[in-house]
Amino acid sequence: MEPLIYILVALISLAVGAGATIIITNVHNKKKVGQNQNKAEKILEDAKNEALAIKNKAIQEGKEEVNNLKIQAEHDIKERKSVVVDLENKLDLREDTLDRRSSNLDRREELLNEKESKIDEKKSEIDNLNIKVQGIMKEQENKLVEISGMSKEQAKDIIIKKVKEDMSNEITQYIKDEEEKAKNDAKANARNILSLAIQKYAGETVSETTATTVSLPQDDTKGRIIGREGRNIRTIESMTGVDLIVDDTPDAVVISSFDPIRREVAKKALEILVSDGRIHPARIEEVVERCRTEVEMDIREKGEEAVFKAGVGKIHPDLVKLLGRLYYRTSYGQNVLQHSLETSFLAGKLAVEIGENEQLAKRAGLLHDIGKAVDHEIEGSHVEIGVALAKKYHEPAEVIDAIASHHEDVAPKSVIAVLVAAADALSSARPGARSDSLENYTKRLESLEEIANTVKGVQSSFAIQAGREIRVIVNPDQVDDASTFKVAREIREQIEAKLQYPGTIKVTVIRETRASDIAK
């Protein structure tokens, strides 16, 4: 029995131990679950607090963004209101102008109606007078027929013959007087118009010239420009297409080239290289390309600025670029683009004075020397090149005519062309416009007159148009009309043989025969 008892006791102990283990385990698990629940509640509370902070921050940022948007919207509304107010003011001014014009038109219409009624009255009076005159003439014809015993046709022939004889001298004298009066009036009006146009222009007296010399900070910089075995100077010359003259001139390098654009690119590049100090072939290529781009941009800006200043409307972009190239061209030291702007202004003022199209005259004046932009690259005179360019870009016929005739290579076909030629002469001949010394200028004019005076039959000669034309007056007793062409050709040949001059010189020979008598 005892072993069985022991076994039962062992089993009971084992059961009690297992129950106690289970109870202890459950208590531990419950405690661990409680701890996990506390942790979860804490994490949840932290998450709620963090979410609340994020929410508050987002709300604050949203309020700030809304406030900024509100401020921006108010600023935009304010700007738009100012624009609207400006537009309203402009519209009010335009309405006032239109009202004034309308009232002026109404007054003009009233005046025209009054004049028309007066003209009708005068017309009726003239008709009545014509009827009375015809009646009187009829009575006189009948009386003449009775007195003379001639027929109406015979009397008419005698009267007409007598009237023709009496009126012939009077008509001749009248025509002569009117022609003289017209010439005097035309000269006076031309002087007034030219003086008004010149007075309204306020350009500078001295024009700019293109610089071709680059100053160096010190004379040893020349060696760096030349480089080892001349590689630097060869690179500069090959990249820019100019010749660099490094001579004994202290602290200076001379740039030589017929192309002013190349000279400008080389000048800018050399100045940058000298100031930077890094002079080697790779750097030279980089700087030259950058300077070439800058000059191209500057050319377009100069052209656009010239078109804007002239106020001639839209011009083809290629012509605008060619106008910009004129900034780097000079003629007798006068900047060609500045000369073109002067000519445009003066031609416009002349057109206003005589009632022609001002904008068309200004456009023709601005483009009259456009051929000089590429006359180094294309064969032909700048006039021929300019005409070809104007036709290519479909410029108006008046502009083409002005370009073709402004040096009198062809006869002008329009009034605009004549105005442009006059404006061109004014701009070129005004004091200080061209860098020509007074001594050289006077000497050239004297040489022209001396050559003309040596020709047989010449009575006197006058060099005008800054030496671009010479007018010769011949003795009518020694030179007949046919011989005037021979005199002009002889003078032209002597000028070509004896003088050095740019451009062309026009020779005009004048022969005048005067008949006079004295009434006693």
Image (cartoon, grey):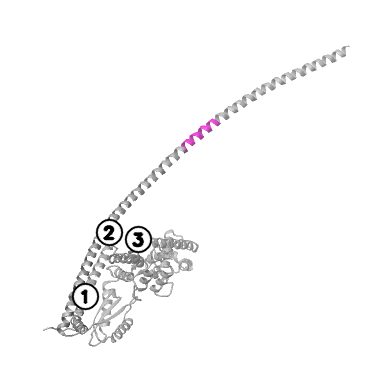
Magenta residues span 51-65
Judge by depth and name the residue closer to the eye, 443 or 250. Answer: 443
Q: Is residue 328 left or right of residue 20?
A: left
| Helix, strand or loop for disc 3 | helix
| As drawn, 427 above or below 168 | above
Q: Nearer the viewer, mark 3 or mark 1?
A: 1
Amino acid at dot 3? Lys
Which of disc 1 and disc 2 is earlier in sequence? 2
| Helix, strand or loop for disc 1 | helix
Q: Is residue 357 left or right of residue 158?
A: right
Q: How many marks?
A: 3
Residue 501 in the image, given as x and y percentages of width and height? 33, 77
Tell me the distance, in whole angstroms, between the alpha carbons under discs 3 and 1.
Answer: 43 Å
Amino acid at dot 2? Glu
Amino acid at dot 1? Glu
Q: Residue furthest top?
A: 1
Query: On the image, numbered disc 1 is attached to which residue?
Result: 178
Q: Nearer the viewer, mark 3 or mark 2?
A: 2
How packed is label 2: few (under 14 Cα within 10 Å), some, or many (20 or more)?
A: few
Tell me the distance, in whole angstroms, between the alpha carbons under discs 2 and 1.
Answer: 35 Å
Query: On the image, numbered disc 2 is attached to which residue?
Result: 109
> Is residue 451 one of those drawn in magenta?
no
Residue 54 in the image, given as x and y percentages of width and height? 53, 33
Query: On the image, numbered disc 3 is attached to which residue?
Result: 309
Position of the C terminus, as image quadrant, is bottom left
Say if residue 488 shows up in the picture: yes
